[in-house]
Image (cartoon, rainbow, N blue to C red):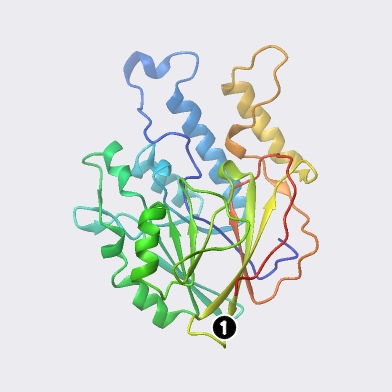
Amino acid sequence: MKKYSNAMLVDAGDFLFKTDRLTKPHGKSARSAPPSQWEKQTSAARLLLDFYREMGYTLAGVGQKDLAAGPDFLKEQASSRGIELISSNLTKDGRKLFTPYKIVEKNNVKIGFTAVTSCNAVRYHRNEFECMPPEAALETVIPMLREKSDFVVLLSNAGDGINRKLAEKFPDIDLIIKSGFGAKTYSPQMLGSVPTVMTHPKGKSVAVITLKKNKDSDKSARVQNTLILLTTRFTVDKEAKTRVDSFERRFVQKKPHSKSRVMHGAIPHRVKLQHHEPQGHDMEKGMPPHPQQEKVPGSVEPH
């Protein structure tokens, strides 16, 4: 991040849990050994949020799987670490469940972020919250962000079908960063006139995204994206690895002679990025890394 001093770290969601719903054990089962899935996965989520705080994430969109332990758990754990979560379409008793948007200013550049969560989440959390259709939730948010921001970025967990509708309805969106199901993008993929970007799942890559003012087009931004595979050539943070090893000793049952199963891509690396001179305003989107051997592609700029 030293090389990208004007960057912001953001995540589009689905970074905390592998499942859609966790059930909290009660009574005798709550004190059972080995530890319950609730204890294991919520402990992993707390550790992952610790890492996000220490890496300096600006904000994250709320994904369907992030709600697995319930909205109260998610809000409490993120808030206690100073991590801002946004979602424009989740409500409870007529009120927004999360902050619907945030305008972040850095180096005199204003980026307006908003987010949408997959409404499939309601299937697993009936009576806990409601979900507005993303198109309706963004009806007033996008025009307001367009007026007050230099760039408008949507963090979307809604899926490509909904993303396509949003891109058609709101062409003023400069960039959609996707989470959930979908293919990783080594270069921005266009939905109509709106570029979209998606990283590998489980923190196996980060995307370094550069937004530039576009003077030669009706669109306000040009988008460059470099997808960086976090391979074993990057140095693992020793302190973080010690904390993950401690977690695994407590929760992970390993078979004889098996290799360590790093929890959900949670070990941050000290990343030294090469061969990229940042221009304009950079954003780095991704989850804490997980070792993976792949070739790192270069960045491109769409026309």
Q: Quadrant of the N terminus?
A: bottom right
Residue drawn at the location 25% of the way across and 47% of the way down: 129
Q: Amino acid at mark 1?
A: Asn
Residue drawn at the location 27% of the way across and 39% of the way down: 123
Residue drawn at the location 62% of the way across and 46% of the way down: 288
Q: Is residue 161 above or below residue 37?
A: below
Question: Residue 139: horizontal and vertical position, in percent?
Answer: 28, 70
Left or right: where 51 falls relative to 182: right
Question: Residue 135: horizontal and vertical position, in percent?
Answer: 29, 63
Q: Is residue 170 above or below residue 84?
A: below
Q: Nearer the viewer, residue 117 or 252?
A: 117
Q: Which residue is mark 1?
A: 214
Q: Quadrant of residue 283?
A: bottom right
Q: Nearer the viewer, residue 251 or 115?
A: 115
Left or right: where 52 falls relative to 101: right
Q: Is residue 263 above or below residue 136?
A: above
Q: Nearer the viewer, residue 269 or 293?
A: 293
Q: Quadrant of the C terminus?
A: bottom right
Q: Residues within 10 Å of mark 1 (few under 14, many from 20)?
A: few
Question: Residue 146: horizontal and vertical position, in percent?
Answer: 41, 79
Q: Quadrant of residue 144?
A: bottom left
Give the total number of marks visible in the rendering.
Answer: 1
Q: Residue furthest bottom?
A: 215
Q: Secondary structure at mark 1?
A: loop
Residue drawn at the location 62% of the way across and 57% of the way down: 207
Question: Residue 272: horizontal and vertical position, in percent?
Answer: 78, 55
